[in-house]
Image (cartoon, rainbow, N blue to C red):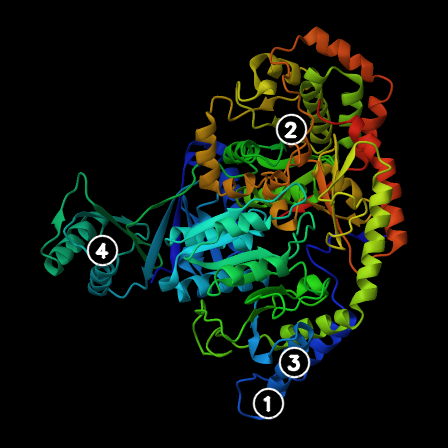
Amino acid sequence: MEAYFDNSATTRVFPEVADLMTKIMCEDYGNPSSLHMKGLQAEQYLRYAKETLAGILKVRESEILFTSGGTESDNLALIGCAFANRRRGNHIITTSIEHPAILQTCGYLESQGYRVTYLPVDNNGQIHLEDLQRAMTQGTILVSIMHTNNEIGSLQPIEEAGALIKRMNPGTLFHVDAVQGFGKARIYPKRMHIDLMSVSGHKIHGPKGVGFLYVGEKVKIQPILFGGGQQQNLRSGTENVPGIVGLAKAAELLYNHLDEDVRHLYECKSHFIEGVEQIPDVRVNGLLPGAPYGEGTAPHVVSVSFRGVRSEVLLHALEEHGIYVSAGSACSARKPQPSATLRAIGVERALLESTIRFSFSIFTTVEEIDYALEVMYDKIPMLRKYSRR
Amino acid sequence: MFKAFLIKYAEIGIKGKNRYLFEDALIHQMKYALKKCEGEFLISKTQGRIYVDAKTEFDFEEVVEHLKKVFGISGICPVVYVEDEGFEKLCDTVVQYIADVYPDRNKTFKVQARRARKNYPKDSMTINMDMGEAILKAYPEMKVDVHDPDILLNIEVREKIYIYSEIIPGPGGMPVGTGGKAMLLLSGGIDSPVAGYMIAKRGVKIDAVYFHAPPYTSERAKQKVVDLARIVSRYTGPIYLHVINFTDIQLYIYEQCPHEELTIIMRRYMMRIAEHIAKETECLGLITGESIGQVASQTMNSLIATNEVCELPVYRPLIGFDKQEIVEVSEKIGTYETSILPFEDCCTIFVAKHPVTKPNLNVIRRHEKNLDEKIDELVKTALETEELIIVD
């Protein structure tokens, strides 16, 4: 049996999406900028994609800007805003548990003379609005907060933060990294006071190498790529038509029955938490008080620390049984240092390197979870026996 | 412009009656290296010289890069050759050659002719003088210096006439295959690939053994070792990499023996297994990347303990090297970047906080007795389930 529990790293593409993309690549392969029929056809595909995504977010089609994925969206949002608003201030606020695409970009902006405040999170992995309020100044040009944390699945109070920001300084822009949240929750930028929002295709059963940035119509950003002037001069480069359409199709399929899917994911999550807690000496990270089965956190992510087991070893042991998980998040799994997010939520030192992330998708079944639990019941005592003394 | 290379070889010249064996091995290794280059080449051995003639278009940089990895070559001379169309024509060619190769001509030179074809009308001394005169006439800024010239211009008269003056240094050493074969204990670290490189440089063909310990070491760690072997194989030719699943042996030692001695006892079993494969594959020795005192298992006391389980000699070319010196070689041969990728290897996973640094041989032997019940069976299984990867 195979159990792929690494859906926060990437997901399996919907067959319908792959079929549609194949058709576009092999038959309807025109360049949307070309004047002839084939170009027009490609442009119509783009229009379908924009309509679909704009419909899901309840925004205008002109507010969707396609990119190469989450990282580019985050870079464009932060750098593009910072540079376009330089005369209004140089202060940026973000959180200490953002994805590296945000944190590294903030580091770059600091080297360019910007000042960045990193909001702390509590043991549930959530920011406190009072901290945000205190950090806001007249010179704050941008606040960037992630919707769903990729490592522990904590959710941030996006709508409340948006309202607070706009109340304190209507000129401050609000960016949301929704790479892990889009496709799992209904997010409405207008209602939530979001000015910019990053989304990636491959986290929602779409293709890799494509994403989009929602940019509210009144928001000024500066491009970071220059060239042929596509997408209102904000993102030059021939549009990745098959990728863009694949992303839109995947989003359409997901949002057609989002509520059932989310219910299914929570069922998987609570079933898993219940099962994994049967193992002695484990700790599920990031749960809210009084919500033992992950209510109020992302439906698809569970972070578990197994005392006395090195996460990499457990990962490879599970892999031998066709179970795929992540040690930390995929983005940090290649680096040896322990996760900053886990440290930020107060996971004790001994557990930092014993933490595994399980992330589910709508394809996940209860049978797969039971299978994985059985394997863990069997393996973990053995792995603990042979730990480093 | 260059159509051939004259290959200068190092120590082969002094090998007496066996010399042809060394030359043939060198040619074999050169052919292997050139197979990976674009173009067709003819390698010929005449009168104590080895020439590489390009039969087709080729990429100069690529060929030099590959030849620089063939042990036994001390120098690579890019050669221009011309048909014999009279001495005047030859002078024109040489003058043009100097213009092409030496944009700055404020240099001293010496012509060194060699008349291999004895029916050529001028003898060597005459060629030297007449050619020198022609060059001085063309470039008055150049000067003759017969003792220590900046440019030593070689003119060799054969069926064609060969002109060369530059020597690109080769790696030295002796052609791989002339010195027998040895088994390298290859980990994913910095040292062992360098050790393999150094022994291969003495003409030794290399095979390797890697101890894999899933799930404690990952597939990526194994891939890293294959990648390292591939880099080393550019110097040594194909490497037979024996991958041994070591997990059960390691866990059994962990269960049965004192933790401080785990690494030493583990190393002893690695040596035993490596030697077993070495003997079966006609290797004449083992190679490790050990260096005195680098880690607990590499103190002189520990080396006694790991050494005593082998009959074959264990070659430790890095024994007197500092880490920095090893790093320098690994950067030179191109293994460093791969070696430092952060994957756990099986030597470090269960390492004790304070492993023994001065193991007592009798104590170690006594504790190894705890393994009597199952160890032979486990070693046998490990050997039977080895995976052979031919790295080329």
Q: Earlier in the sequence, mark 2 or mark 4?
A: 4
Q: Secondary structure at mark 4?
A: loop
Labels 1 and 2 in the same subunit: no
Task: Bin the neighbour count of mark 4 within 10 Å (Cα to Cα): few under 14, some 14-19, many 20 and up.
Answer: few
The N terminus of chain B: image quadrant: bottom left
Is any atom of residue A126 visible in this view? Answer: yes
| Chain to which mark 4 belongs | B
Task: Judge left or right: residue B129 versus residue B1.
Answer: left
Chain for mark 2?
A: B
Total residue callouts: 4
Q: Position of residue B356 (x, y in %)?
A: 64, 14
Q: Which residue is mark 1?
A: A40
What amino acid does circle 3 point to? Glu
| Chain at tag 3 | A
Give me the disc on residue B348. 2
Tell us which disc is closer to us: 3 or 1. 3
Q: Toward the viewer: A320 or A53?
A: A53
Q: Amino acid at mark 4?
A: Tyr
Question: From mark 3 to mark 4, how far is it between C-alphas?
Answer: 67 Å
Callouts 3 and 4 in the same chain: no
Dot 2 amino acid type: Thr
- Mark 3 or mark 4, whichever is nearer to me: 3
- The residue depicted at 38 percent of the width and 60 percent of the height is B3
The answer to whether the residue labelled 3 contacts the one labelled 2, judged by CB atoms less than 8 Å apart, is: no
Give the amino acid type for the residue marked by disc 1 in the picture: Leu
Cα distance between the residues tagged 2 and 4: 54 Å
Q: Is residue B16 left or right of residue A356?
A: left
Same chain, labels 3 and 1:
yes
> Could you tell me residue B151's position as x and y percent?
22, 47
Q: Secondary structure at mark 2?
A: loop
Residue A79's quadrant in the figure? bottom left
